[in-house]
Image (tube, helix red, strand yellow):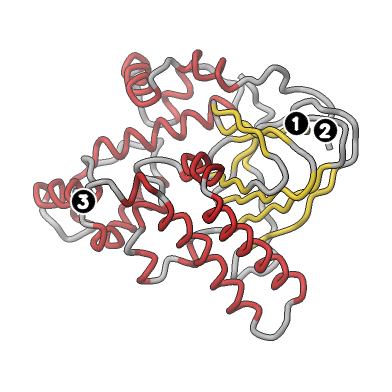
Amino acid sequence: MNHDAYDEPIRYMNNVLCIHIWQVVKTYTHVNWNPRWHYHKQLEFLYMQEGSMEIRVQDQLYRLDPGDVFVVGSMQPHITRKTDENKLAYLVLHFDLQPYFDPALLMHFRYFSEIDRPLCSLNGQIKQKEEMRAELTRTILLLFQELERKSIGYEIAASLQVRQLLLTLLRHDDSFRHAAVPYEQANAPSLRPVLDYVNLRLSEKIQMSEVSAMMNMSYHYFSKYFKKVMGLSFVDYINVQRIRKAERLLLTEDIGITEISERIGIANTAHFYELFKRINRCTPREYMRRLVPERTIGDSS
């Protein structure tokens, strides 16, 4: 286990917009992996300007070259490295989705909350689709200019650019547009208090009777309503969120499996193993082996 991983704090350039965008320039010659995995609740976009680098997002490895755009989903552990001794320059954008969940965006709450899959799964399409990549690039550069210049009304312009980024992802996502959508997207926002409640109490025993009462619904009606809206049962949703938290603990805490199991609210270690393998198709130990690059400890800046 690698307890050098950490929940990276993001300092916003504007606390209303909850955005930080800046240029990273690296001229050092070391090409080792950065020494620490990190994650954050904010979405992250990278726009490569000069040079090349590699990025691992959990167990997936990607190479980024000039002109590439890359997205990292909320709370996804990732790590980077410079691939050669040439100059490296790229833009990094972080923003919190919460302030942008207006009624229109809430219609797609499930999609942007990454209930079914992380937004990182879109990177293959971004790499292949020139039009999608061009739209994302143009929007990121406009956003960078707005936050740098801070002309009158830049807050409005920046807010529009963030929504344009999200719209580009949604409209170019083939797997989403062609999939049958069995759940009721329009009703997903009504469950936001429930999802927040669950995420704050993953280490505790979560009773559906308490949650249904909070929603002023009967136990059985809430159970059916949740599955109809979210596409999975309330229990399955809790289990997925607990395993996602376990994944982060495997990277961030130097503790044993038994303690991780307890800290995500699963008292039975065998049950934890069963759930982890069902969701990730591997054991916790195999998951960690997949996450460790050739060399994760080395010089970086």
Number of residues whose C-alpha sits closer than 10 Å to that of mark 2, classed few (under 14), some (14–19) or many (20 or more): some
Q: Earlier in the sequence, mark 2 or mark 1?
A: 1
Residue 268 percent across, percent down from the top left = 33, 18
Extreme residue in the front direction: 130
Q: Which residue is the site of mark 1?
A: 34
Callout 1: SS: loop
The residue under the point 21% across, 59% down is 215
Q: Amino acid at mark 1?
A: Asn
Quadrant assignment for the C terminus: top right
Mark seen at residue 271? none
Callout 2–callout 1 Cβ contact below 8 Å: yes
Residue 61 percent across, percent down from the top left = 60, 28
Q: Which residue is the site of mark 2?
A: 300
Callout 2: SS: loop
- Residue 287, above or below 248: above
Q: Earlier in the sequence, mark 2 or mark 3?
A: 3
Q: Left or right: 273 with respect to 161? A: left
State the separation of the CA atoms marked 1 and 3: 41 Å
The answer to which quarter of the image holds residue 170 is bottom left
State the separation of the CA atoms marked 2 and 1: 5 Å
The residue under the point 26% across, 58% down is 185
Q: Which residue is the site of mark 3?
A: 183
